Image (cartoon, rainbow, N blue to C red):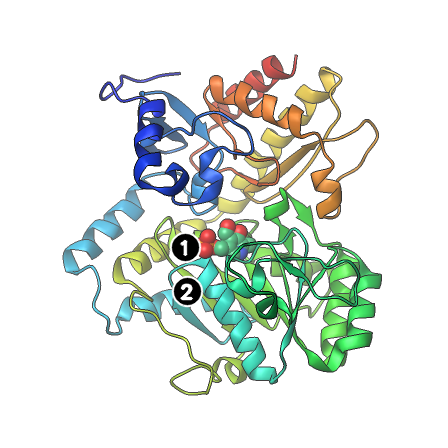
Amino acid sequence: MSTEPRSTLTNDSLFERARRVIPGGVNSPVRAFRAVGGTPRFIQRAEGAYMIDAEGRRYIDYIGSWGPMILGHGHPAVVEAVQKAVLEGFSFGAPTEREIELAEEILKLVPTMDQVRLVSSGTEACMSALRLARGATGRPKIIKFEGCYHGHADSLLVKAGSGLATFGHPTSAGVPPEVVQHTLVLEYNHIGQIEEAFARDGSQIACVVIEPIAGNMNFVRASVPFMKRVRELCDQHGALLVFDEVMTGFRVGLGSAQGIYAKALPGFAPDISVFGKVIGGGMPLAAFGARRAVMEQLAPLGPVYQAGTLSGNPVATACGLATLKEIQKPGFFEDLAARTRTLLDGLLGAARDNGVPMVGDCEGGMFGFFFTKAGEGLPQNYPTVMATDKERFNTFFHGLLDRGVYLAPALYEAGFVSAAHTARDIDDTVAAARIVLR
Ligand SMILES: Cc1ncc(COP(=O)(O)O)c(C=O)c1O
């Protein structure tokens, strides 16, 4: 699978050049291929379901910029909206009608929120949502789960302590232990642990923040009984439930992950929701929202400060709005989910036929698979994800990459299918997987 190279540039030479001027040669660590080894592909351009690297090689793209590109690359309606917006101005630092339109569109699709605030990245949105939760409750502590990623705010770069009674340890240099002293890290899907944490610290806990389908440990769903218990505990103790839907939002379905839990648990709703990725359609845009009483705690109305030079950027909002319009077309998510399911079933079938133990799951346009031991089910938490077969994943990743299929370069990352992926793309991917797994 290759197209004509645009120049004599190679991925190796670009990586070498990049490493001279950018730490590790990348502007976000996972892009460096450290988990899988080898040279990252430097992307020259992308179209539809494909990315083309500096050497002119074409890849079927299952990263989709880590989630945003749900329509594929360069969707005509999105390109047109962005081009029009660019001509009107890049950034004003003053309110625009388009921000209202995007807020209205998001609120129409997520009935658990009355208001949203637009920001520029998922990190910023999560950080602001947690400040809001603390400000609204007047409490210091937060609960997060091991394996969930909510961006790189200081207090979230933390791993579990040695026991439940101890608070976590920073996972990054530069984060003093005092900064994470209010962050409690628990095991995902472990009802007993969160019950114990609330029994001990309930009156101090501002919120529980969770990826409802954790895409930062590949693909692990919070079980319905677990989510139900988390909601009950938050209600009993006056804590807020924060759904980090930066990845799942408008990706696993039009109603996002909260829509899925609300089907299983009638009346279920998070208190604060965080979005990113798809709502920006590939531009830097994210948002957090809640009921009016909570959102009115934010500046300029309330005491919780939050701001941003580029927040609600006019080009990013145009891109996000055009994307949200497209995904609401009849049958969009049915088609996307069916295609994703076909891909996952194809991969699982290829593994089965070759005697390779593999399990997987998908929802809407998001999927994950794991190389397990024979007879093992889907991992339910971070330790079981990390116990899956990394060597086999890495071999599989490189085998597919060599055959023009680009999966996320780490076993703990989810995969994404876009509306631009054709049945042929899926067939080609499964055929390549069969060869690699043989
Ligand atoms: C669930 C989740 N929350 C937050 C973030 C942080 O978003 P960003 O990378 O835009 O800062 C990510 C990024 O992948 C994410 O997956």
Please give left or right for residue 221 compared with residue 26 in the image.
right
Taking the image as drawn, is residue 404 in sight?
yes
Measure the C-alpha gap from mark 1 to mark 2: 8 Å
- In depth, the one of 184 and 173 nearer the eye is 173
Residue 377 x, y percent position in the rendering = 79, 37
Position above or below: 349 against 181: above
Q: Quadrant of residue 228?
A: bottom right
**Which image quarter is the C terminus in?**
top right
Residue 123 x, y percent position in the rendering = 47, 60
Which residue sits at x=52%, y=70%? 129
Characterize the local packing of mark 2: few (<14), some (14-19) or many (20 or more) Cα atoms within 10 angstroms. some
State the mark number for residue 324.
Answer: 1
Identify residue for label 2.
105
Taking the image as drawn, is residue 249 in sight?
no
As shown in the figure, which amino acid type bears the numbered disc 1? Leu
Characterize the local packing of mark 1: few (<14), some (14-19) or many (20 or more) Cα atoms within 10 angstroms. many
- In depth, the one of 130 and 271 nearer the eye is 130
Position above or below: 308 against 147: below
Task: Tell whether label 2 touches label 1 (CB within 8 Å).
Answer: yes
Position above or below: 66 against 293: above
Q: Secondary structure at mark 1?
A: helix
